[in-house]
Amino acid sequence: MSLIVQKFGGTSVGSVERIKNVARRVAKWRAAGHDIVVVPSAMAGETNRLIALAKEIQAQPDPRELDVVASTGEQVTIALLSMALLELGVRARSYSGWQVKILTDSAFTKARITSIDDKAIRGDLKAGTVVIVAGFQGVDAKGNITTLGRGGSDTSAVALAAALKADECHIFTDVDGVYTTDPRIVPDAKRLRTVTFEEMLEMAGAGSKVLQIRSVEFAGKYKVPTRVLSSLTDPMMPVAEEAKAGTLITFEEDPHMAMEKAVISGVAFNRDEAKITVHDVPDRPGIAYAILGPIADANIDVDVIVQNVGHDGMTDMTFTVHRNDYAKAVKILKGQVQSHIKCRDITGDDKIAKVSIVGMGMRSHAGIAAQMFRTLSEEGINIQMISTSEIKITVVIEEKYTELAVRVLHKAFELDQV
Ligand code: ADP
Ligand code: ASP
Ligand code: MG
């Protein structure tokens, strides 16, 4: 008997019929003798609808109140799923984030989980009850409702699995695993049977929305065996078969797999970013901190950062932020920062995209970056910024070329052949 946390995304609980199917699938795993904790998302489109409602009232909604609104989608699905299980004769009980207590910091709309109280859940599991916990939400030390950032139910699930020392975490979604790239963009994309934790971390960080990056961080930190699976298959598919389906995130590269694997495992992209350039700042110690310190203080994450070689004691600095934070970041820079560092100008562009190639094989193969740049140049795609890690190369390009870039890179690295 194992303890398994099973997360179901928005599409998977997108209608009453689908919720009933989730209940059938969960009941099947329970009947196989496992203790089950289920983490549903809100019904597909619901979180968008709730945020849009808030924006009809306040263009920049008050973050605390926005989280109160945005978290309600999951409160609906936990109870509906619990009812669907009860209807099947399975003992079930739903909990909101604050009922559990999933404690977070107070960074509304992108809170981080700090601890999870497992008492109530363990008690229910012992009594043979399926426990259903709302994804995406938590509560801060002062009792305020918080949310974990878009796609945050993945993180709720993996964090619960870590806290409960679960044997596995299943992420059920509308694709049957992690692919070489988003199969919506490249129909030839191939499912990966395994992906290493490091690759998944880079892919999620580079924009592959199949898993929220923080869920991958939790999986890595607490070594949670995590599997991405389809919720759209027959819910009565045998447990033994389903247990091996999808994509497993591994913590060590299987040497046999590594031999066969392509150098690159995947292509990721992110259209949610904007870039900001601070022109002609004095090229002296402390300048990066003077620019990026106030941005960090405002809880804005900065990604790709490029500083030019100085000229005449001056330099330019360019960096990317999430598009949602773009206006706020520019405002901070044009306010307190510009008067302090005395730069010439601050400009920005929110029509950019990041495209990345990820793969463990990069460690042992030279020339991957050159091949990437050649492939893009052959399509006339200009590279605006470049950043690299040991197993990832990211370029910033004009947004309109995103799909083309993803397709040609997928082909150039023969990911349609894996
Ligand atoms: P859920 O609502 O279940 O959380 P998401 O929409 O957040 O589902 O994530 C699943 C989607 O992620 C897929 O439908 C697919 O379009 C997208 N996706 C992006 N990159 C990948 C990838 N490399 N492999 C699989 N799916 C991907
Ligand atoms: N419902 C939330 C969202 O749409 C959380 C999630 O689906 O993971 O972002
Ligand atoms: Mg998701």
Image: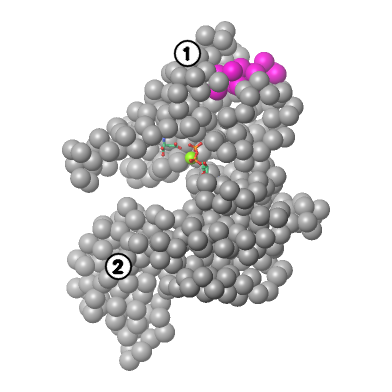
Residue at 51 percent across and 38 percent down: it is 154
The secondary element bearing badge 2 is classed as strand
The residue beneath circle 2 is 348
Q: Compared with residue 23, is residue 4 higher up or lower down, i.e. above or below?
A: below
> What is the total number of numbered labels drawn onto the structure image?
2
In which quadrant of the rendered view does residue 104 lie?
top left
Whether residue 69 sits left or right of residue 204 in the image: it is left
Position of the N terminus by quadrant:
top right
How many residues crowd mark 1 within 10 Å: few (<14), some (14–19), many (20+)?
A: many
The secondary element bearing badge 1 is classed as helix
> Three-letter amino acid code at disc 1?
Met
The color scheme shown is one colour
Q: Main secondary structure of the magenta part?
A: helix
Please report the bounds of the magenta region as a residue range. Answer: 22-33
Residue at 38 percent across and 38 percent down: it is 147
The residue beneath circle 1 is 83
